[in-house]
Image (spheres, rainbow, N blue to C red):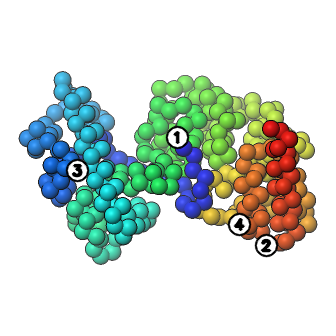
Amino acid sequence: MRSYDDDTLPLQPPIRLPDAATLASAVRAAPLAGELKALLALPDAPQTALPDAPQTERGEKQGDDQGDERAGDARVLEAWARVCRARLAADERLLLELIRMFLSREPVAGRVPQALTDLGLVRQAEPYTLSWLGLWVARLIIAETAGQEIPVMGTLAGADAATLLHGLRSYPEAERSEELAGWLAGRDRERAAAEIAGALAGVSPLSRAVGVELLESSLGEEGRRALRGLLEEPRLGAVVAARTGREERRPTPDEIAWVLVDMAAALLEFGGGEAGEVIDSIAMGMDAEEQAGTIAILAFGDHPWTGRVLRVVIDHHPDERVTAAARKALRRLRGLADIRT
């Protein structure tokens, strides 16, 4: 799974999608499906119509031909994705409208481009919103063009802890609770808490923040016990203490820079260009002279996001004394990196 650290687009909340059989049925029902049948090599309707059959809670069909039907659905979706990519690449107006509708998640007032409706990407009647196919295609395109893999609700149940935390970065509170409940189902809570705690050191700053919050607030005493077990860990323990208000665990001088960068980087990782929040997280109410002194030590923290945080300060801080300190710290960081290599 790729991380997304481009500040041009904030991390997007998860979407809900039906199973592949339902999506494939939507392709077959799209207005353009008949015209493009030869190009797509779609089977005729009698062969591909999904027969009435018992379904599981996940919508999976029962029967001996289940594997063949799944393979056929996958081929239909793969072919339709190619068609949609080609149509959207040929008309930037369609692409921009699709992405705008996806990002807003709101009905469109008035008509939408007919081509999006013909592709089955937009509902054919008011309110004009993206269909399941529209959400699915927009998700594919954003992953390919922006590098952001937007999570799908219900897909993290079998993931390891690091993948879970990565996926949950953009979840609103209610959806996060729902996804976590699915992940916890069938797991021993104490072992689950230990798995999340064990992943914190190796994940991204925002994933780490999510993990600390889950252990503190969503996993009961088992989670809080797992957090207490991390307090003496170098760097990680200092981050846990800072995020949970455990004042008894004071950071050592060399941990201060690492904690400051980690907390600022979590904001930066979410994206959206909120440079002011990143700067405020480092400033902590200090005046410019004090901020410059704090910035000067960031290079010594050896945090992988230090360079990105310093560049935000250089580009956006309003005080020249602080930006000068950040430029000097960035030069020092690069020099230390050369020495380490």
Q: Residue at x 55, y 59 (%)?
A: 10
Q: Which mark is residue 318?
A: 2
Q: In this view, does 332 lie above or below 92?
A: above
Kindly report the distance in space between the C-alpha atoms of the residues bearing marks 1 and 4: 29 Å
Q: Earlier in the sequence, mark 3 or mark 2?
A: 3
Q: Give the residue at mark 3.
A: 27
Kindly report the distance in space between the C-alpha atoms of the residues bearing marks 3 and 2: 52 Å
Q: Earlier in the sequence, mark 1 or mark 4?
A: 1
Q: In this view, does 153 lie above or below 157?
A: below
Q: Picture coordinates of residue 322 (x, y %)? A: 85, 66
Q: From the viewer's perspective, is the residue at label 3 or at label 4 nearer?
A: 3
Q: From the viewer's perspective, is the residue at label 2 or at label 4 nearer?
A: 2
Q: Residue 1 carries which label?
A: 1
Q: Picture coordinates of residue 225 (x, y %)? A: 70, 31
Name the residue nearer the viewer: 63 or 247. Answer: 63
Which amino acid is tagged 3?
Val
Which amino acid is tagged 1?
Met
Q: Residue at x 75, y 53 (%)?
A: 307
Q: Residues within 10 Å of mark 4 (few under 14, many from 20)?
A: few
Q: Earlier in the sequence, mark 2 or mark 4?
A: 4
